[in-house]
Image: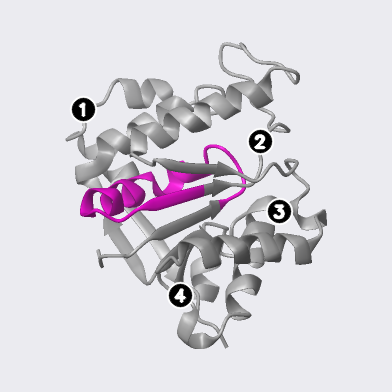
Amino acid sequence: MEKERHVLVILPHPDDETYMAGTLAAYIHQGAPVTYVCLTLGEMGRNMGNPLFANRVTLPEIRKKELEASARAIGIQDLRRMGLLDKTIEFEDQELLIRNIGSLIEELKPSLILTFYPGYSVHPDHDATGRAVIRTVERLPEAKRPKVYCAAFSKGCREILGQPDITNDVTNFLAAKVASFQAHRSQFQLMAFLDNKSFDDPELQKRLGREQFWTYRFG
């Protein structure tokens, strides 16, 4: 992995960071500061734990604490929440959202931004978040644009986007990645699978040991 000056992660929901937790842990291990901006608290999520332990009233605070625990597990020290409402990012004032993201870029001057690939990341909030990031960065002078790596996983995305540009082997950071998953107890149903596997288990390494991204190419 190339060394980065500062990595800015912009994702919509608590637990989205699990998709790239190993990569984030690897950057932190290299000494790169990582700032994670989570746009919502995922308060409209349908999962309430298994067995059930949350409800519509308690879920936002539960997911806030899960997000904080996940960030600690990965090693992220700069966690920020934008306070938007879950499942509404596409309906937010897009110019305001772009200005807010632009302010973060101006403050942090990241060399790399990680987000979702607009149009290829399944959830409307994922797509809207990635789209806002791209629109923000493309307004910057070309010489001042950070790299943007995007996660994509919609059906057929590889036929359109091609093969991922970046494949990170994160097997050395599975402890952090598994702990990130485990922090989100209200959301994930693969806990039994994770709890019963050692980090050198071939099945665990196959499922969680690689993280892939596409480089967004502007214009």
Tell me the SS state at disc 3.
Answer: helix
**Residue 21 image point, x, y percent:** 38, 44
- Separation of residues labelled 3 and 2 (CA atoms): 13 Å
Discs 2/1, front: 2
- Residue 188: tell me if it is visible: no
Q: Is residue 195 left or right of residue 13?
A: left
- Separation of residues labelled 3 and 1 (CA atoms): 35 Å
**Label 3 sits on what residue type?**
Pro
- The answer to which image quadrant residue 139 occupies is bottom right
Residue depicted at x 33% and y 43%: 208
Instruction: Identify the mark nearer the N-term, 3 or 4.
Output: 3
Residue with the mark numbered 1: 198
**Residue 91 image point, x, y percent:** 82, 55
Residue with the mark numbered 2: 42
Instruction: Identify the mark nearer the N-term, 2 or 4.
Output: 2
Instruction: Identify the mark nearer the N-term, 3 or 1.
Output: 3
Q: What numbered label is drawn on residue 46?
A: none
Magenta residues span: 11-36
- Separation of residues labelled 1 and 4 (CA atoms): 33 Å
Q: What numbered label is drawn on residue 162?
A: 4
Residue with the mark numbered 3: 124
